[in-house]
């Protein structure tokens, strides 16, 4: 008895419990539905491409589906695709496309504005570069002029010092030959 109970429990658990899954009939086919999981069963209707269906179970190469109208039948598994059909996705895709086109236009305008700013800044940058180069040339010229002035002042001071020294030597040589003043004698006493 335990074996029979275990076997029946095992069989009961091995029967697949399929959750209902949203799907649709492939967008490029019209499918005839059958009363059972195979071509040998009677055709009981037709499902249009893109029509949403709910997958109830799978057996062999067939899927049991329920249409939106509530009719249950079997179709080949290869014609059922999971998710929403392209027909149902089209409005949201068109809305996304319109939003993307608006965003692209805004980004194009932003790119144009930024390119214009870049060209203005490039012009300003080149002007500043020219000013910097001109000022660097002025600095070099002024440093050269200062160096020349320092050298000129040094030469002038050396020249004046040399002339003063020469004058002192000449004066020192000439003073002994100058006539001396005689002292006045006061004979009053």
Image (cartoon, rainbow, N blue to C red):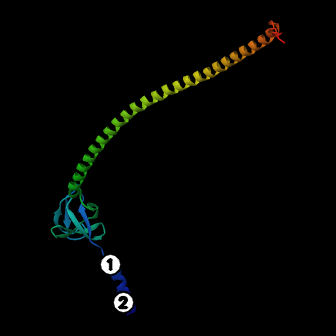
Q: Would you call the spot at circle 2 few (<14 residues within 10 Å), some (14-19), or many (20 or more)?
A: few
User: Which quadrant holds residue 104?
Assistant: top left
Left/right of residue 174 with respect to residue 125 in the rendered view: right
Residue that label 2 marks: 5
Residue 54 in percent (x, y) is at 23, 68
Q: Is residue 178 above or below residue 141?
A: above
Q: Is residue 130 above or below residue 152?
A: below
Which sits in the foreground, 154 or 17? 154
Which sits in the foreground, 82 or 106? 106
Left/right of residue 51 with respect to residue 174 in the rendered view: left
User: Which quadrant holds residue 111?
Assistant: top left
Residue 32 in percent (x, y) is at 19, 62
| Mark 2 or mark 1, earlier in chain | 2
Residue at x-position 22% and y-position 53%: 95
Residue that label 1 marks: 15
Residue 131 in percent (x, y) is at 45, 28
Q: Is residue 96 above or below residue 80?
A: above
Q: Is residue 111 above or below residue 138?
A: below
Q: CA distance from mark 2 to mark 1?
A: 16 Å
For the residue labelled by badge 1, is the local secondary structure a helix, a strand or a loop? Answer: loop
User: Which quadrant holds residue 75?
Assistant: bottom left
Dot 2 and dot 1 residues touching (CB under 8 Å) = no
Left/right of residue 143 with respect to residue 108 in the rendered view: right
Question: Which image quarter holds the C terminus?
Answer: top right
Which residue is the extreme one toward the bottom? 1
Q: Would you call the spot at circle 1 few (<14 residues within 10 Å), some (14-19), or many (20 or more)?
A: few
For the residue labelled by badge 2, is the local secondary structure a helix, a strand or a loop? Answer: helix
Residue 177 in percent (x, y) is at 82, 7
**Which label is found at residue 181?**
none
């Amino acid at each position: 008895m335990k074996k029979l109970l275990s076997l029946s429990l095992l069989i009961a658990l091995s029967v697949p419990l399929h959750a209902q899954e949203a799907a649709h009939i492939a967008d490029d086919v019209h499918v005839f539905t059958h009363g059972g999981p195979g071509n040998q069963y009677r055709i009981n209707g037709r499902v249009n491409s893109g029509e949403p269906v709910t997958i109830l179970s799978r057996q062999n190469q067939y899927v049991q589906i329920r249409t939106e109208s509530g009719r249950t039948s079997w179709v080949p598994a290869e014609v059922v695709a999971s998710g929403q059909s392209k027909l149902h996705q089209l409005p949201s895709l068109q809305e996304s496309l319109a939003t993307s086109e608006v965003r692209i236009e805004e980004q194009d305008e932003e790119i144009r504005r930024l390119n214009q700013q870049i060209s203005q800044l490039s012009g300003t940058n080149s002007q500043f570069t020219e000013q910097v180069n001109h000022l660097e040339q002025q600095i070099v010229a002024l440093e050269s002029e200062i160096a020349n002035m320092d050298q000129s002042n040094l030469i002038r001071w050396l020249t004046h010092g040399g002339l003063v020294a020469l004058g002192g030597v000449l004066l020192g040589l000439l003073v002994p030959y100058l006539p001396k003043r005689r002292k006045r004698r006061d004979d009053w006493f």
